[in-house]
Image (spheres, rainbow, N blue to C red):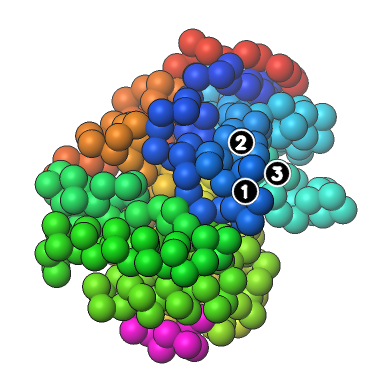
């Protein structure tokens, strides 16, 4: 029985370049190009996100093996630094524990890393471990993760697409398209004008009923965000996303007050834990939240974050993260749709987000997906390109 199985080994891998890190797609990919970021204030780092190091950490993969040989795995960004934390610190809270004691292991990992963690890289590492535990438990119980966290509340998931071509996303059946913002405050009024013109053209292409959104990726200040919202308002944006750094709750609250729900305000991709989202929600800084299950603390913590959002009347629409999000979204009435990150270099076709790292990764068809009823997260690990950096038993 699953409850009797104990953890006997933890293996930590990094992925060699080109092996599956969606931040490291080469210079021809839209995700690497000119997109407004916190570093856009410096001209030498404005042209590409790789110029200032978005891709330096790489991917980390955690495998957890139970006493009967069953293996579960999880992935996140964090690369060698996260791998070191897992191998040298977190693994001690796993070896010998019952595989079903997921809450206990999460709590011990979080408490033990408080003095240097709480957010960021450490929570990435905890997230990967937690996802591996859920995957392992699903294989032990021969159940999909979505069944273990409450069961599906809908037959299929609807998606909006994130990428530079919402017009193509509409043709592929998505319910909306979220574009990356190219120009931030350093581009001044010309940046506002260019963004407005681009948004106007896209609205003409997709029509009035298709959602259009703008992802601002922590690049703005309040005056620029308000100006941007006013410039885009005639073309009916559904929401503005992540205009400010995650810690700047005051700016989020001010922007939301200024917009008065004419345009929704969302954020949370770079926030972590129930305490981080409690601060955001109590500050009334967002109409809905967007935690990333690979970064916020894993599935164990995402469930708590979502319960908190429900109590505040806010949706939980996770950021990207493929099957790790899908298993959550399909179980929650407060998560009525999901994000699909367009990973084709020109955003002109639907391809798996974590390819080639994940095998059997499902993708939407006509903007919708019926989640396969396979154990765990329902995907296998492609070992080509993996480099084992630590094994603890």
State the separation of the CA atoms marked 3 and 2. 20 Å
Asked if the residues shown at circle 3 and circle 1 are in contact, with their CB atoms under 8 angstroms apart, the answer is: no
Earlier in the chain: of badge 1 and badge 2, it is: 1
State the separation of the CA atoms marked 1 and 2. 11 Å
Asked if the residues shown at circle 1 and circle 2 are in contact, with their CB atoms under 8 angstroms apart, the answer is: no
Residue 36: image location, x then y, percent? 51, 54
User: Between residues 265 and 382, which one lies in front from this camera angle?
Assistant: 265
Mark 1, Cα crowd under 10 Å, few <14 / some 14-19 / many 20+, is few
Kind of element beneath mark 3? helix
Q: Quadrant of residue 261?
A: bottom left
Q: Is residue 279 left or right of residue 197?
A: right
User: Between residues 157 and 35, which one lies in front from this camera angle?
Assistant: 35
Q: Is residue 286 above or below residue 57?
A: below
Q: Is residue 259 magenta?
A: yes
Please report the residue visible at 55 percent of the width from the left and 65 percent of the height from the top.
185
Q: Which residue is mark 2?
A: 51
Q: Is residue 389 visible?
A: yes
Please report the residue visible at 29 percent of the width from the left and 50 percent of the height from the top.
161
Q: Is residue 370 left or right of residue 381?
A: left
Q: Which residue is mark 3?
A: 121
Please report the residue visible at 73 percent of the width from the left and 18 percent of the height from the top.
390
Earlier in the chain: of badge 3 and badge 2, it is: 2
Front disc: 3 or 1 = 1
Mark 3, Cα crowd under 10 Å, few <14 / some 14-19 / many 20+, is many
Residue 348: image location, x then y, percent? 23, 36
Residue 236: image location, x then y, percent? 25, 74
Q: Which residue is mark 1?
A: 43
Front disc: 3 or 2 = 2
In magenta, the rendered stretch is 255-263
Q: Quadrant of residue 193?
A: bottom left
Residue 220: image location, x then y, percent? 56, 66
């Amino acid at each position: 029985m699953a409850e009797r199985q104990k953890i006997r080994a933890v293996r930590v891998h990094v992925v060699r370049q080109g092996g599956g890190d969606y931040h490291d797609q080469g210079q021809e990919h839209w995700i690497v190009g000119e997109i407004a970021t916190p570093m856009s204030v410096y001209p030498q780092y404005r042209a590409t996100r790789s110029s200032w190091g978005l891709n330096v950490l790489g991917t980390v993969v955690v495998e957890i093996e139970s006493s009967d040989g069953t293996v579960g795995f999880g992935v996140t960004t964090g690369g060698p630094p996260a791998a070191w934390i897992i191998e040298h610190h977190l693994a001690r809270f796993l070896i010998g524990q019952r595989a079903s004691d997921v809450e206990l292991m999460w709590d011990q990992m979080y408490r033990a890393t408080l003095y240097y963690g709480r957010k960021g890289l450490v929570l990435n590492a905890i997230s990967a471990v937690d996802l591996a535990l859920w995957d392992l438990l699903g294989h032990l119980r021969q159940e999909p993760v979505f069944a273990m966290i409450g069961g599906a509340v809908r037959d299929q998931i609807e998606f909006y697409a994130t990428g530079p071509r919402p017009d193509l996303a509409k043709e592929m059946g998505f319910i909306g398209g979220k574009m990356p913002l190219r120009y931030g405050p350093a581009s001044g009024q010309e940046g506002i004008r260019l963004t407005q013109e681009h948004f106007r053209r896209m609205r003409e292409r997709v029509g009035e009923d298709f959602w259009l959104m703008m992802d601002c990726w922590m690049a703005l200040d309040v005056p620029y965000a308000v100006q941007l919202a006013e410039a885009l308002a005639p073309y009916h944006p559904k929401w503005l996303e992540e205009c400010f750094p995650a810690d700047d709750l005051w700016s989020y609250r001010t922007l939301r007050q200024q917009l008065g729900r004419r345009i929704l305000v969302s954020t949370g991709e770079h926030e972590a834990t129930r305490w981080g989202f409690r601060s955001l929600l109590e500050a009334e800084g967002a109409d809905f939240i967007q935690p990333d299950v690979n970064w916020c603390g894993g599935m164990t913590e995402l469930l708590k974050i979502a319960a908190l959002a429900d109590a505040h009347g806010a949706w939980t629409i996770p950021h990207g993260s493929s099957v790790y999000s899908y298993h959550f979204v399909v179980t929650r009435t407060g998560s009525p749709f999901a994000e699909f990150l367009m990973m084709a270099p020109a955003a002109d076709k639907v391809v798996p987000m974590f390819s080639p790292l994940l095998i059997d990764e499902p993708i939407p068809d006509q903007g919708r997906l019926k989640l396969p009823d396979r154990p765990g997260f329902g995907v296998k690990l492609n070992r080509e390109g993996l480099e084992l950096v630590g094994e603890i038993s």
